Image (cartoon, rainbow, N blue to C red):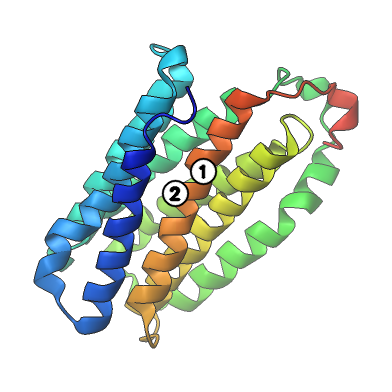
Amino acid sequence: MYRKGIAWLYLFLLAAVADMAFLTQGESQLRYFSKPLIVTGLLFYFLTSTKSIKGSILRKSVAAGLVFSIAGDSLLLFSNLFLYGLGAFLMTHICYIIAFKLTQNHGFNPLKVNFVQTFLFNLPIYIAAAFVYFLIRKNLQDLQVPVVIYIMAIVMMTTMARERFGRTNAASFWQVFLGAVLFLVSDSILALNRFYQPIEDAGVLIMGTYTMAQLLIVMGVRSHLIDPKKITPEKTGG
């Protein structure tokens, strides 16, 4: 089952390479075709390789996240549609938060959570997001509220990925967590380039980290389905 859809991964790879090439050559018009195809390849790969859980909330949430990503990728090609693209990716993060929670092998018990330890584990993520906001806040103007909401969503998505430690197999945890971190890095570069100061080769850095983030998240969910390792809450460390 999990070998099905490899052709869609080739589409993902070819579209990603083509989009990078168009970026470096300044062929912005051609990116209207290449950029949406990147995540489209991942979407159909995911749907093809997860038919055994057809109809499940997990499958629907990941698929919805990828669909919103395709919409966001398309909208962000137009500078005047930035807010709509931001909204689409906000929905992506909400879908991924649901998916990450579903790919944990035990329920949430607030009475057994060490909130201080959890806060300390997540602190580097909070600091990174706060630092980026500190740098861009003066130039946000009317976008300040939407951007703050978006930052909160992507931080929650990243911390939810970290929370999976010890609650799934190692491959799934690291793929999803690194994917979430790269998503945060990609969006941070985009924000700094747009609202702070131009970054050399920003487009390549943004798309490179973003493409790898989406691939790792999809493969991490796939790894959980292959080997859902069960671990008791006491071994998770928070």
Q: Quadrant of the C terminus?
A: top right
Which residue type carries mark 1?
Ile
Q: Which residue is depicted at the point 26% across and 46% down?
A: 70
- Quarter occupied by residue 236: top right
Q: Secondary structure at mark 1?
A: helix
Is residue 66 or residue 139 the one in the foreground? 66
Which residue type carries mark 2?
Gln
Q: Which residue is depicted at the point 82% across and 23% down?
A: 231
Q: Secondary structure at mark 2?
A: helix
Q: Which residue is depicted at the point 62% across and 39% down?
A: 160
Does the CB distance between marks 1 and 2 fall below 8 Å? yes
- Quarter occupied by residue 104: top right
Residue under label 2, please give it.
214
| Badge number at residue 217 | 1
Q: Position of residue 53 (x, y in %)?
A: 46, 14
Residue positioned most to the right? 234
Q: Is residue 91 visible?
A: no
Q: Which residue is depicted at the point 42% across and 31% down?
A: 62
Q: Position of residue 126 (x, y in %)?
A: 64, 58
Q: Could you tell me how far apart the alpha carbons at marks 1 and 2 are, in whole angstroms?
A: 5 Å
Q: Is residue 222 visible?
A: yes
